Amino acid sequence: MSVLDSDPSVGNGKRLAPEALDQLFLEARTYIAWKPEPVSHETLKELYRLARMGPTSANASPARFVFITSTRGKERLLPALMPGNLDKTRSAPVTAIIAWDVEFYERLPHLMPFGDFRSYFVGNQPLIDETGMRNSSLQAAYFILAARSLGLDCGPMSGFDADKLNAEFFPDGKWKVNLLCNLGYGDPEKLYPRAPRLEFDEACQIL
């Protein structure tokens, strides 16, 4: 049974099992090397089906995803990457370009049919840019958690020439890259030691 077909009360005060928290957060790592196991198209479809359910401003859902699985696709992508990202991307079964649609607001009559939300954005480029980048970044985080929930490992990346990548994959200018994420089944033998994280008092306030 799919997560999305399960008990609708999940999430209303019920904690995930410790094993789930380990898989999503505590034992999850950023992978730079990959086992030679493919990721099926059905898994990628299920990944998107989960990730799309996370909340965004006005349900705008600006993120767009390009899953690169072919050698030809990688050949088009690699020239836009910084040297340190080449090997990890070349060997990954999938690299997702996580982009955002610069005309996302045109879908608002369908996605948010409870008012005229489209009119808030038309002609307001600063609001379009801010909403598109912020919410596609939020969707990228949902995407990573969804991937981990399906047993995939992730390697999110910046470190690329956005202008070069956009020119190659989105020449009409209607989508713009936000970040990249390698996907597959990571090789734990090639992980770096886990880096520190900030403690609560270093990063948080309660007012």
Image (cartoon, grey):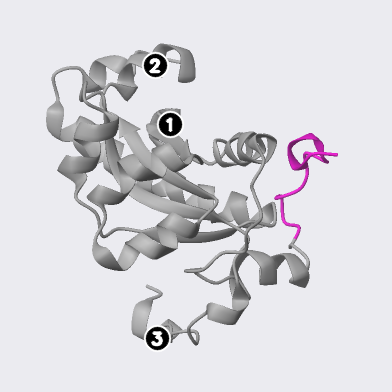
Residue 14 lies, with reference to residue 51, above or below; the image says below
Q: Is residue 67 magenta-colored?
A: no
Residue found 24% across the figure and 21% down from its top = 120
Element type where label 2 sits in the image? helix
Q: Earlier in the sequence, mark 1 or mark 2?
A: 1
Q: Quadrant of residue 129?
A: top left
From where the camera sits, is residue 134 visible? no
Q: Main secondary structure of the magenta part?
A: loop
Q: Which residue is mark 2?
A: 107
**Residue 123 horizontal side relative to residue 25, left or right:** left
Q: Horizontal and vertical percent for residue 43?
A: 67, 41
Query: Is the residue marked by circle 2 packed among few (<14), some (14-19), or many (20+) residues within 10 Å?
Result: some
Q: Which residue is mark 1?
A: 61
Judge by depth and name the residue closer to the eye, 61 or 191.
Answer: 191
**Residue 109 horizontal side relative to residue 27, left or right:** left
Residue found 48% across the figure and 83% down from its top = 192
Q: Horizontal and vertical percent for residue 88?
A: 43, 63
Mark 3 or mark 2, which is nearer to you? 2
Amino acid marked by disc 3: Asp
**Marks 2 and 1: in contact by CB < 8 Å?**
yes
Highlighted range, magenta = 1-14
Q: Which residue is mark 3?
A: 201
Q: Is residue 10 magenta-colored?
A: yes
Measure how far apart labels 1 and 2 are at the Cα level: 9 Å
Amino acid marked by disc 1: Ser
